[in-house]
Image (spheres, rainbow, N blue to C red):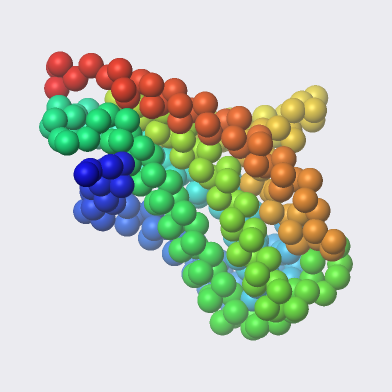
């Protein structure tokens, strides 16, 4: 009997055939390589960011620095490329009528699309993490890492903490994905949804630096991109990690629910 997993497999096959899928993944591979190449060609280090001064001491510092830079524009854009298109493209191509006539209900189709968008987000993050670790270790070696508390962390443990950091980093990315799917559903316009998702992320970044708004900064979606810092302290600081879980849920869950309701009520009489 067909389930949402059937729709999920359909959507994954669609993503495999789309150019924008590889455009986003290519960017997540290129950025670590460009960063390491630039590092090898100059003597300086990005000392103004966390772990920046350690990129020449341990290759495991490099993917952590990349997480800081990527949260500003790279991952919001990569996420928006697919999330903002995954439903709007069906409207543009006039294929909603076709998929609604398949042996699945609208709820199953929507869940399949949402899971496909989230899977792409996960793949993009893992791609950058793997390339960043490999390129970083190749450039700066497999050495212990200095934590944010100033303590020395062995290379194997630092790798485990990096993996955990990627997991926490995925949480706000998933919320942005849900927002992108919402805009894709509501606007019915791929370009508008992609740009809208990116602009929302950048707006959060702007609010973070505005004076007089320090009280709301801990509860902004993009602030949660720094929650992984808690894993790189000794002992581990769980407060930002736990806050990221519920704050991102406040953004992502309602966005997904509203998108689902709109999708279920979608009138496709016009195509």
| Residue closer to the observer: 257 or 203 | 257
Q: Where residue 58 sits: x, y (%)? A: 69, 77
Q: Quadrant of the C terminus?
A: top left
Residue beneath the point at 64% across and 58% down: 165
Q: Is residue 213 visible?
A: yes
- Give the residue displayed 39% in from the left and 44% down from the top: 115
Q: Is residue 184 left or right of residue 90?
A: right
Quadrant of the frame with the N terminus: top left
Residue lying at the far front of the rendered structure = 1
Q: Quadrant of residue 66?
A: bottom right
Residue 192 is at least partly visible in this image: no
253 in relation to 53, above or below: above
Name the spot of residue 249 as percent of width and height, x first.
59, 35
Q: How many numbered marks are there?
A: 0
- Which of the two residues, 26 or 179, is positioned nearer the viewer here? 179
Residue 147 location, x and y as percent?
79, 66
Residue pictured at 23% horizontal, 43% vertical: 2
Residue 64 occupies quadrant: bottom right
Residue 188 on image: x %, y %: 29, 25
Q: Which residue is painted at 46% across and 63% down in the image?
A: 127
Splitting the image into 4 quarters, where does residue 79 fall? top left
Direction from residue 73 to residue 209 in the image, left or right: right
Judge left or right: residue 172 versus residue 218.
left
């Amino acid at each position: 009997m067909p389930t949402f997993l059937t729709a999920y497999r359909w959507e994954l096959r669609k993503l495999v055939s789309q150019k924008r899928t590889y455009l986003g993944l290519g960017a997540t591979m290129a950025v670590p390589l460009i960063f390491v190449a630039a590092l090898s060609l100059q003597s300086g280090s990005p000392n103004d960011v966390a772990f920046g001064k350690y990129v020449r001491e341990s290759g495991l510092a490099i993917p952590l620095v990349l997480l800081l830079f990527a949260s500003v524009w790279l991952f919001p854009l990569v996420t928006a490329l697919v999330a903002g298109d995954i439903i709007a493209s069906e409207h543009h191509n006039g294929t909603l009528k076709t998929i609604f006539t398949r042996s699945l209900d609208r709820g199953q189709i929507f869940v399949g699309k949402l899971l496909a968008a989230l899977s792409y987000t996960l793949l993009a993050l893992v791609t950058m993490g793997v390339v960043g670790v490999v390129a970083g270790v190749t450039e700066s070696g497999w050495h212990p890492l200095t934590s944010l508390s100033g303590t020395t962390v062995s290379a194997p443990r630092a790798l485990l903490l990096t993996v955990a950091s990627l997991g926490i980093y995925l949480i706000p990315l998933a919320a942005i994905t849900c927002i992108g799917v919402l805009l894709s559903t509501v606007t019915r316009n791929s370009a508008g949804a992609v740009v809208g998702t990116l602009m929302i992320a950048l707006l959060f970044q702007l609010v973070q630096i505005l004076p007089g708004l320090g009280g709301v900064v801990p509860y902004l979606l993009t602030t949660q991109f720094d929650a992984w810092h808690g894993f790189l302290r000794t002992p581990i600081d769980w407060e930002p990690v736990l806050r990221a879980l519920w704050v991102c849920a406040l953004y992502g869950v309602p966005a997904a629910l509203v998108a689902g309701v709109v999708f279920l009520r979608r009138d496709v009489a016009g195509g």
